[in-house]
Image (cartoon, helix red, strand yellow):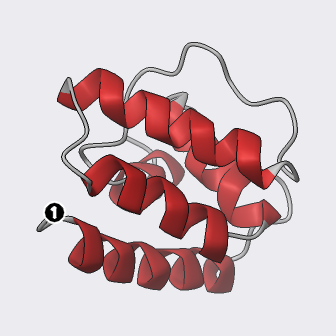
Amino acid sequence: MNIQRHILLLLCLPWVCLSATAQPTDMNDTQQLREYVYQQCIAEEGEDNGGCRCVADALAQQFNTKEWAVFISALNNSDQLPAEVTINDLNSMLSKMEQIDAKCSNL
């Protein structure tokens, strides 16, 4: 497994990372991205006990365009990081995801 693929897998929340079917078309459309994450989570969980909405809302509030691009790449099982993504971007994203996971995993 190459290092970029490993990083993408580590960044993606285990209960949200699925095989994507209808990828969002606009990384700047926060509402579309939020709904996409919510629907993917519901498909995995079978229902929303509050955790799916929590994760989708938190990602929509906290992620920037680069972070969304990395997240969607991970959902799509990409082997490559999106262009212009740096280690600092990945560290920032990981920190945000850890906070979101801590906040939402108990719902």
The N terminus appears in which quarter of the rendering? Answer: top left
Q: Amino acid at mark 1?
A: Leu
Point out residue 71 in the picture as x, y percentages from the top left corner: 57, 50
The C terminus appears in which quarter of the rendering? Answer: bottom left
Examine the rendered structure and indicate whether residue 22 appears above or below residue 107.
above
Regarding residue 90, the answer to whether it shows in the image is: yes
Please report the residue visible at 60 percent of the width from the left and 38 percent of the height from the top.
35
Regarding residue 73, the answer to whether it shows in the image is: no
Left or right of residue 99: residue 69: right
Examine the rendered structure and indicate whether residue 35 appears above or below residue 4.
above
Q: Which residue is mark 1?
A: 107
Examine the rendered structure and indicate whether residue 59 appears above or below residue 44.
below
Point out residue 5 in the picture as x, y percentages from the top left corner: 47, 45
Examine the rendered structure and indicate whether residue 61 appears above or below residue 1.
below
Number of marks present in the image shown: 1
- Residue reaching furthest to the left: 106
Please report the residue visible at 61 percent of the width from the left and 48 percent of the height from the top.
34
Q: Nearer the viewer, residue 80 or 43?
A: 43
